[in-house]
Image (cartoon, rainbow, N blue to C red):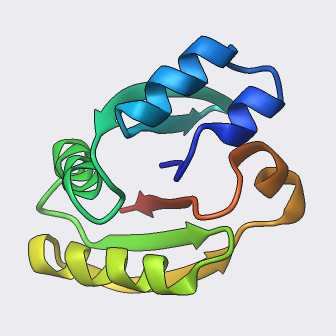
Amino acid sequence: MLDSLDNLYKGGRIGKAGQLVGSLLNIKPVLNLHAGEISAYEKVRGNREGKALERLIEILKEKIDPNKKLYCVIGYSDNLEAAEYMAEKLKEHLQCEDFIFMQMGCVIGIHIGLGAVGMTFYQ
């Protein structure tokens, strides 16, 4: 989940109109990494700590098997506090066996920008 659309615009992945409208409507793109390819999963309105994070948790609940152990990894670009907040919210809804925090590298950071947080899981 990206905090802003600025880096997507600067990198040429979205146009100026998309960046402007998305910023005005406070749209947070939810991206999906599967089989080495990144794609837009959906767009959520709201801030990282509100509706957007709630939607990420809903997506995770849809994807997991509740009968298996769940391990969660939370990545962040520059804001460990946002990652820890995400972990606290996840604990309210899911039984993760372990949380691993991982700072994303500069190559990823160039594309997603500051303030981005993400999660992955395995069972």
Q: Position of residue 71 (x, y in %)?
A: 38, 73
In the rendered image, the vertical position of residue 30 relative to residue 39, given as above or below:
below
**In the rendered view, would you say 57 is above or below 11?**
below
> Outermost residue, right direction?
107
Give the left or right position of residue 82, taking residue 33 as reference: left
Q: Which quarter of the image is occupied by the C terminus?
A: bottom left
Nearer-the-camera pick, 34 or 2: 2
Please give the name of the residue rendered at 79% of the width and 52% of the height, measured from the top-left corner: 108
Residue 9 horizontal/vertical position (percent): 72, 28
Identify the residue at horizontal 68%, vertical 39% (top origin). Answer: 6
Where, by quadrant of the figure, is residue 18 drawn?
top right
Relative image position of residue 45 (x, y in whole percent):
28, 37
Report the front residue among 106 and 64: 106
Residue 37, image x, y percentages = 67, 28
Query: For the point 73% across and 21% down, which residue is it?
Result: 13
Q: Is residue 94 left or right of residue 44?
A: left
**Residue 75 falls in image quadrant:** bottom right
Residue drawn at the location 46% of the way across and 61% of the way down: 119
Camera-side residue of 53 and 102 = 53
Using residue 84 as the reference point, say whether residue 49 is left or right of it: left
Number of on-image labels = 0
Side (left or right) of 40 relative to 59: right
